[in-house]
Image (cartoon, rainbow, N blue to C red):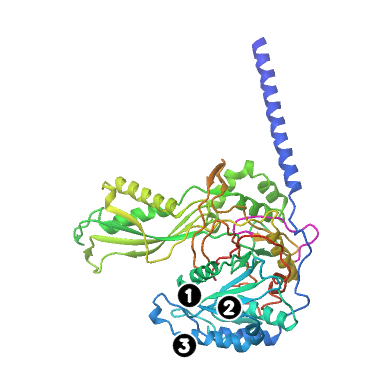
Amino acid sequence: MHAKTICKVLGGAAALAAGSALGAVGAVCAVRAAKMKPSRPDGAPLGANGYHAGDDAVGRFQELLRIPTVSRDDSALVDRRHFARWVPTLRRLYPLTFAACELHMIDEFGILMRWPGVNSALDPIVMMAHHDVVPVEGQVWEHDPFGAEIVDGEIWARGSLDTKCIIGAFFEAAEHLIRSGYTPPRDVWYFSSNAEETSGPAARDAVAWLRDHDIHPYLVLDEGGAVAGDTPLGVKVPVAMVGVSEKGHVDLTVTAHADGGHASTPTDIDAPRLLARVCEHIAAHPGIPCFTEALDATLAELASRSSLLYRLVFSNLWLTRPVVAKIMAADGEMAAMLRTTYALTQLEGSNAHNVLPPVARANFNVRVAPFETVADAVERARALAAEKCVASGVSPDHVTVEINDAVPYTEPAPISPFENDAAFDYLHRCVSGVYPACIPRQDSLRTCRIPAPIHVSSTRFASACTVSAASSTRVRRAGSSMRKTSASASTSTSAASSSTWRFWRISTSLPDKGKELQRRMGNGLVGDALLSTHPAGKGLIWLPANKR
């Protein structure tokens, strides 16, 4: 009886202790949620000083859109006449800019221009875009893709978002500022590729040109995200998306070998069936979901403008990470933020409907997460292929996984600084000023990371994780922590690698599926702000591509 009493007392004490512990955890979670606030820039917003693009600017933009500068994988099929028209058209539309700038042609149709600044000894700003567009054959358009018609206040045209809008932005801003007597405090370079869509060499050659001339950019801006309204986590305000890195990409050729034969006598290890099993195994096992500091910050930034429930969850990832990882991994778009992805895009088998081929092939388009390398992604695919071969009763050499060298591939770009970074804060101020509807309030804007949203618009600001090439990046697997040395930056179709460069991307366009660019194209386009005095510093910031 005495022993039973003691057990009851001990049990009650344990329950009380457990309840107290849970209460303490709950209190900690509540405090952290209460402290979660949107970020704000350190300085005042930088606007366009009253500038607004008028009908004349829209007309010039339409003229650029009507030039069908279509690039193709087979350069012999490119209509060079349209590319030959590009610079003369720009020169006619923006005479002051061409009079003030030096023009260098890269690979015949690539454009590199220098706008001299007050102090050319300062590291310059580089603004990038591409004037080539993808083909329209086989697509259904409600309006002529090269007609640039304005319908309900919106311009319909191929390239209006990707990325002639940036080209129009630069030249409209430059022409306006030059007309007003403005000289930038440092040199401003403009580069536009004529074959970005086909991974042409112009960007790499432009970077080589700058290096050969001992030019080391401070800031480079290229195409990136947008001001998005359909934000996750219950956020009700627009978010300006500023990408601070880009996944690497590589195409893998998976080849299965078998004896082949007539279709009347199939086996379960015929090349097509073996290939199908291997491909499904690879696609179904893309890697363990990982949280970077950038992703943590992005989620926190979004949650800071959402409900109390979201703030409780995302301000306490130390506790909720495993559940959050499971939920995100089940959603295709969110899962891509957590891991390397393997997309099965092409299959090749027999040339005849009744023949079993001795060889079957598939192509995977692989997007490599910032915390991995191309070699990591390839090795995983090879290991999975070998595993499925053994399970199918054949030796691993029946299936090979090789990099498709016909398609250019790149390592993930290093993640740019964003916390306590003067250049990134400058972008924060520019976005706030150029988008009045998105100006953060007193309690707005918080920092995030990864291709992160810069919440702007009576809202917050997302950003990216501080990491440079050859530095150490903190990576969290679903519930645990680890550290992994990041790979050095690699050459890309938009820029080349250097361990001292920093990469960012920003966009001023507002996509809406096929309706590609609101008429208020420009509105200062970041141009006025970016061409103002910029904090001194070193490194390069690049903004890769977020397609259509």
Point out which mark residue 348 bears: none
Image location of residue 380, percent across then percent down: 41, 50
Q: What whole-number distance in Å separates the C-alpha atoms at marks 3 and 2?
A: 18 Å
Q: Is residue 441 found inside the magenta-colored segment of the image?
A: yes
Corner quadrant of residue 305:
bottom right
The residue that mark 3 highlights is 81
Q: Mark 1 is on which residue type?
A: Ala
Image location of residue 385, percent across then percent down: 35, 51
Mark nearest the camera among 3 and 2 is 3
Image location of residue 478, percent across then percent down: 55, 44
Can residue 209 be seen from the camera position used here? yes
Name the element at disc 2.
helix
The residue that mark 2 highlights is 164
The residue that mark 1 highlights is 195
Q: Residue at x 72, y 39 (%)?
A: 28
Q: Please tell me which residue lies in front, 523 or 92.
A: 92
Name the element at disc 3.
helix
Which stretch is magenta? Answer: 439-452
Name the element at disc 1.
loop
> From this viewpoint, which residue is outermost toward the right?
442
In the picture, the quarter occupied by the C terminus is bottom right
